[in-house]
Amino acid sequence: MPDALASSLERRILEHKPLSIDAPWAGEIVFPYYDGLSIRNLAHTVVRLLNGGQLAGRLGTAPLDPALWEPLQGRVQRVVLFISDGLGWRLLQELIAADGHFAQLIADLTADGTLTPLTSIAPSTTAAALPAIWTGSSPIATGMVGTRVFLREFSMLVSMLYYAPVSGRHRVDVLEDWGLDFGAFLPLQTLGEALNAHRIPSYLLLQKDLLGSGLSRLVHRGVQHVVPHSGYTDLWVNLRNLLRQTRHQRCFVNVYWDAVDSIAHLHGTATEQALAEIARQLEDLRAVLAAEGVADGRTLFVLVADHGHAEITTYVPISDHAPLIEALRCAPGGETRFRHLYLREGYRAQVAGYLRERMPHQFASLCPADAQAAGLFGPDPPHPETAARLGDLTVIARQGVGLSEKHPGAPSCHGGLSAREMLVPLLMRLL
């Protein structure tokens, strides 16, 4: 395993400082590396490899760093992308160093390929990350800037996972009944659509309860073949059968599995439950890839995560801080660790000053326009609603801290800019 490459790329990522943040702990922040070392670059790389470098349209213009994919050019006819939601690079490296079983699993999976870090995007959360992976665009262009954002179209704070108002009890995707057009909401070409343009078939293996959801309808546009599963066991049977079925075909296969993220939210990141899930997942991946009739010598297997996870030891309730409550014009958006504050007119300087004076070792605040200009949300042309969705003040929490609305939440979260959240593994090998 070429550890020198991983070390070199991680050093480049950690030295990447496009934005100055006024906080005594600012050195801990890891910024998205959109120019070749982020999950934004995956779709571009898939198009490059499967289409032999012949570009059509936008996708394909911003691939991963050449050291990661150029040696594979001309050798790949099938790409299998497995997205393990919530599996962080730092946690995986700790497991490899501490546990021989994990080390062997990763060695077997990597074989003569590469295992290196990438960055997630800002904010490092699924509702923003999956659109970035599937469109090859950063959050500034997708307009998907968090799990909860204020949509001017509906004058309300909305869940970007469930497409329903945050307040009250509503069914999933109710915004469609109120006029949201899923066909136009994400105005970018998806990877599925780009592959269709190149006449390359695509396959999606996804749990049944996510099929047809608003987020899936947005990011999976253009996927030709959908294979549902309903649990952990049939995931692996279906994956093995799908890989046998598509052997020797020029195609793209995507698998998404959310268990690491779900378990970390419920139990914590480095818990027995989470580690058991990671071990089981890696063991079953190893078994599927080694199964007879799967490999064909021209398949690129890619394992990646959308973000990592960070344990939270301190929740700061907004309700304990009257100046914050006074300034808000609606509940905060974004994430527990990366807040979008929607403020009353003239309150931004006051709130920023309050955070700087009262909680300088827990939070840093930014003017969203300054963050946009510095590239925190990406280098692409902005979605027309991005600025409104980002609100009036961006609040970034230090590792271990969350800004909550009412009461303490999950033991582990993501969305922020710590290394544990931002760094994700990229495993690539030919089969």
Image (cartoon, grey):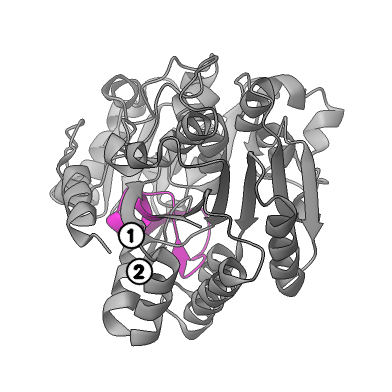
Q: Position of residue 227 (x, y in %)?
A: 79, 52
- Label 2 crowd (10 A; few <14 / some 14-19 / many >=20): many
- Asked if residue 416 is among those painted magenta in the image, a careful observer would answer yes
Disc nearest the viewer among 2 and 1: 2
Q: CA distance from mark 2 to mark 1?
A: 7 Å
Residue extending furthest toward the right: 177
Label 2 SS: helix
Query: Which picture quadrant has residue 293?
Result: bottom right
Badge number at residue 420: 1
Badge number at residue 91: 2
User: What segment is highlighted magenta in the picture?
Assistant: 399-427
Badge number at residue 139: none
Q: Position of residue 194 (x, y in %)?
A: 62, 24
Q: Is 398 positioned to the left or the right of 44 in the image?
A: left
Residue 160 makes an appearance in the image:
no
Identify whether 188 is placed above or below 272. Answer: above
Of the two numbered discs 2 and 1 on the same chain, state the one appearing first in sequence: 2
- Asked if residue 131 is among those painted magenta in the image, a careful observer would answer no
168, 381: nearer the viewer: 381
